[in-house]
Image: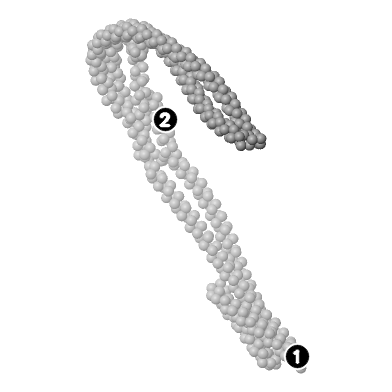
Amino acid sequence: MFKNTKIVTGITVILVISGVLWLSIAGLYYTAVNSDRVNFINNEQLSRQQLLLNDSVHSLIISRVAITRVAVHFLENQNNPDSASQADFNDLLQKASVSLAQSAHDFQAWQAYVNDNQHDAAAEGKLRQTYQALYDVLKNSVAFLREGHYSVYTNLGAQEAQDDLIACWNAWREKNYQLQKLASQQNHKNYSQMKLLLATIAVVLVILVVTIYSGIRQILFVPLRLITTHINAITQGDLTSPIEDGGRSEMGHLLNRLSAMQRALITTVGAVRESADAIYSEASEISAGGNDLSSRTEEQAASLEQTAASMEQLSAAVKFNSDNARQAADLAHIASTTAEKGGTVVSGVVATMQEISDSSQQISRITAVIDEIAFQTNILALNAAVEAARAGEQGRGFAVVAGEVRSLAGRSATAAKEIKALIDKSASRVDSGSKQVSDAGHAMEEIVVAVNRVTSIMEEIATASDEQRRGIEQISLAVSQMDSVTQQNAALVEESAGAASTLEIQAAQLRQAVSVFHIAAADLNRTATMQEMTPGLTTSTTPLIAQGPATQHWEAF
């Protein structure tokens, strides 16, 4: 049924049906919502009318009560009127006038809401008439009572007018209630209809979904499953499964293209097999040349063994040189440390000599003090002699001078002791400096010994370098032999090139046959074909495999 149906046509039909269905649902929803909106607005208007009319009638009743109270007070106080009663009358009449004005305002607002056709025009007209009658009676009552005409007030018929208004008002309220009840019933009816419509739409949607799924399955899923089955068979190399005509749909065109591809693949596989046979014969020649190349490679391997032996000797010599160099570095470090010690010793000698110089300066200053004291002692001694000559028997001044002389003599003795101590200290430091100089000499001797050892090691390094030179000469000779063998291999490579040219031509034919494929299935078919050739190739390639280690040595070199 759906074999020749196109996917675009099916999708278009689905979209059209879905659009019509959704537009229908939207229209029904709008109709229901609009009906509810109208009913809601009508109920709101009816409620507002009811409220305004109730307020208007209520205000009239308040005015009637106030007027009645004025009439009662008028009867009670008509024989004894006073100013207080008159003030009460005026307040009540003013209250009645205000209520009448409020009632008229509410009634006018009510009239503005009753312009619709929901109520009976005759009933509304009668309600207006009875309201106006009671309003006029109450308004005239206020005017007559304010002027004191009570007898005229009693003949106005206020009670009859009020009864007529109440009757019309009750009838209008009953009508208003019936209208609201009708709107509510209409809402319930709309709700029931919408439930039925939604249930119907749900059933239609289920049927539509089942139908759409069935159509999509026939148009898309079944052909896709069939295409997948054929593709899997081709991927596994099975080209015997026939592909039926798929019709005029997109999936049918795809099946037809797949069938054409299968036929082209069968033709191509045949061409590939013929080219593979030709390639096999040329590959045999290449295999023979490879065997010859393998034998010559063995000669290269022997030369490489000699090269490896020379390299081992060279490696041992290099290792020996490395060890000697490491020892030389250690000795150089020791020599550096020794030189640092010598520098430290020399620094100590310099510091000691500086201290000796400082001590000598202190000795010079102390000597100067001693000289000054000796000079002053001579002067005091002279003064003492003069005083003694003048005083005669009186010797006080002489005693003072003698005390000063003794003091100066004590200072001289102390200075002499300090000089002696400094001299001893200087001698000790001079001895220390001499010892440090001796240590510096020993350090220098150690440096000389270390330098001699470094010289000896350097000679050993030179000897090892000579051995390395001879090893390198052997390596050069081995490389020369390898070069000769390589030249022989070059001739063999030329022969292999001729066979490779023929192989290239056959490979080009194979490539041309396979170029029609754009999927990985071509590689699988080519692998299956080459597996048939493997037993013949194994015999010719065995020598190459056997010489694997020699080839690895060559690559490593």
Q: Looking at the picture, does residue 169 appear above or below residue 194?
A: below
Q: Residue 313 carries which label?
A: none
Q: Quadrant of residue 413?
A: top right
Q: Position of residue 442 (x, y in %)?
A: 47, 13
Measuring 51% from the left and 60% from the top, which residue is drawn there? 31
Specify which label sits upstream in the sequence, 2 or 1: 1
Q: Give the colour scheme of this rendering.
A: one colour
Q: Where is residue 407 in the image (x, y as percent from the top left)?
A: 62, 31
Q: Position of residue 512 (x, y in %)?
A: 27, 25
Q: What element carries label 1?
A: loop
Quote the CA–CA distance across marks 2 and 1: 118 Å
Q: Where is residue 11 in the image (x, y as percent from the top left)?
A: 41, 45
What quarter of the picture does the C terminus occupy?
A: top left
Q: Which mark is residue 229?
A: 2
- Density class for disc 1 (Cα within 10 Å; few <14, some 14-19, many ≥20) is few
- Density class for disc 2 (Cα within 10 Å; few <14, some 14-19, many ≥20) is few
Q: Is residue 64 left or right of residue 19?
A: right
Question: What amino acid type is highlighted by mark number 1?
Answer: Asn
Residue 355 vs residue 247, the one in the foreground? 355
Q: Which mark is residue 77?
A: 1
What quarter of the picture does the N terminus occupy?
A: top left
Question: What amino acid type is highlighted by mark number 2?
Answer: Thr
Measuring 49% from the left and 43% from the top, which residue is drawn there? 210
Measuring 49% from the left and 16% from the top, which residue is drawn there? 434
Q: Looking at the picture, does residue 308 appear above or below residue 257?
A: above
- Inspect this view and state whether residue 130 appears: no
